[in-house]
């Protein structure tokens, strides 16, 4: 077990190192932020001062090693535009993105599980076919189009829901949240639904496929033969096996939603890390862009590492060093 964990940790560190190379050099070959901060009347001496202040007067490799050394100390640089540590801006905006992603996950489970369950129990009914058609649309229709349609319908024409912002906030344990206020829930409704559609469609399909498969297993037949109520057979015995792939897939999908909520946050002006990334790209704020991308990489690598370790604990058949344990 220790050998397996050390091997996975070493692989994770290698992946992080390679990704820092790709992210740092990839961001630094795009555009020149100096000309964004310089006025039209800036002289050559003025440009040199700006370059020195931004730390861009050193060779690119020297900048990278300095960045790597600071990264090991938890420092990802200072934002060009805000003048504060980039990670402090990310942690300041992250609760908004986490709240949006969590709301989307709750919606996906609350709607996707019962819809997928119905579609699996009655696969030939018109309602089930309509549910599967809806799930196909959820995968196919672009998120930005859905968001715009929701804004035009519920904000512009009907005036029921606000289109931008988080609304009224309250502080809980030092974190400002919006879902505990009515105004915050109204602001949260459309962006969370937009972000949940892909996850909802995935839950519907996984639940339906799992239900169709598990209904023909021996233990379900045995439970029914023993006179157990149908609601208990489906709700307890069948759902235990159905939820395993659903939870596994949603675990990684939730990380993807947090990382790539950029489009939804931009459409609804949701003040999360995705909106912050778009604003940083607009002004070529390199430290903030790099910090966000490294943050995402660390999140995915950590989640994969934890999943690998958990599987090695739960499944003794995991191979370590080419041998079956």
Image (tube, helix red, strand yellow):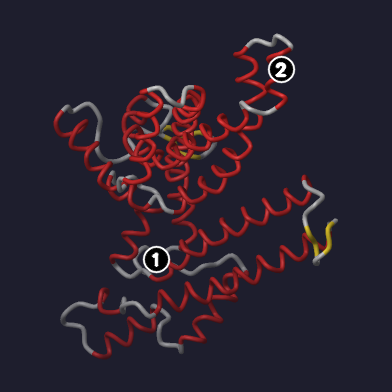
Apparent side of residue 14 relative to residue 97 in the rendered image (left or right): right
Which residue is located at x 76 percent, y 66 percent? 7
The residue mark sitting in front, 1 or 2, is 2
Q: Which mark is residue 223?
A: 2
Most distant residue in the left direction: 157
Q: Earlier in the sequence, mark 1 or mark 2?
A: 1
Between residues 230 and 153, which one lies in front from this camera angle? 230
Gap in Å between the C-alphas at discs 1 and 2? 65 Å
Q: Residues within 10 Å of mark 1 (few under 14, many from 20)?
A: few
Residue tagged by mark 1? 83
Whole-percent x, y for residue 65 in the image: 56, 81
Q: Quadrant of the N terminus?
A: bottom right
Count of number-bearing discs: 2
SS assignment at label 2: helix
Of helix, strand and loop, which one carries label 1? loop
Q: In x, y percent, where is residue 283?
A: 29, 68
Name the quadrant of the C terminus: bottom right
The numbered mark at residue 145 is: none
Q: Residues within 10 Å of mark 2 (few under 14, many from 20)?
A: some
Q: Are marks 1 and 2 in contact (CB under 8 Å)?
A: no
Closest to the observer, 25 or 144:
144
* Whole-percent x, y for residue 39 in the image: 20, 77
Give 264 or 269, whichever is nearer the viewer: 264
Question: Up-down: is 9 above or below 66?
Answer: above
> Residue 131 in the image: x percent, y percent?
38, 29
Q: Is residue 39 left or right of residue 272?
A: left
Q: Would you place residue 152 above or below residue 228 in this image?
A: below
Nearest the camera: 158 or 222? 222
């Amino acid at each position: 077990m220790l050998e397996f964990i050390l091997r996975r940790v070493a692989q994770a560190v290698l992946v992080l190192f390679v990704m820092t190379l790709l992210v740092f050099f990839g961001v630094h070959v795009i555009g020149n932020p100096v000309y964004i901060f310089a006025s039209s009347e800036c002289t050559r001496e003025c440009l040199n001062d700006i370059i020195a202040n931004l730390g861009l007067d050193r060779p690119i490799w020297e900048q990278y090693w300095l960045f790597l050394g600071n990264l090991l100390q938890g420092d990802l640089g200072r934002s060009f535009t805000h003048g504060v540590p980039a990670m402090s801006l990310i942690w300041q905006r992250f609760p908004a993105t986490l709240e949006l992603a969590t709301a989307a996950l709750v919606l996906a489970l609350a709607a996707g599980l019962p819809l997928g369950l119905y579609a699996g129990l009655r696969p030939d009914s018109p309602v089930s076919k309509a549910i599967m058609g809806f799930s196909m649309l959820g995968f196919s229709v672009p998120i930005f189009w859905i968001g715009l349609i929701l804004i035009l319908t519920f904000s512009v024409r009907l005036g029921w829901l606000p289109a931008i912002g988080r609304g009224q906030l309250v502080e809980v344990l030092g974190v400002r949240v919006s879902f505990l206020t009515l105004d915050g829930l109204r602001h949260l409704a459309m962006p969370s639904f937009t972000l949940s559609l892909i996850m909802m469609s995935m839950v519907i399909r996984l639940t339906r496929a799992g239900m169709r498969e598990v209904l023909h297993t021996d233990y379900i037949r045995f439970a029914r033969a023993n006179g157990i109520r149908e609601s208990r057979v489906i709700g307890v015995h069948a759902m235990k096996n159905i939820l395993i792939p659903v939870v596994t897939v949603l675990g990684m999908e939730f990380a993807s939603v947090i990382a790539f909520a950029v489009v939804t946050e931009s459409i609804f002006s949701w003040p999360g890390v995705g909106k912050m990334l778009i604003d940083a790209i607009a002004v070529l704020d390199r430290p903030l862009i790099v910090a966000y991308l490294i943050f995402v990489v660390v999140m995915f690598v950590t989640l994969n590492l934890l999943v690998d370790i958990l599987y090695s604990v739960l499944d003794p058949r995991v191979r370590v060093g080419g041998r079956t344990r």
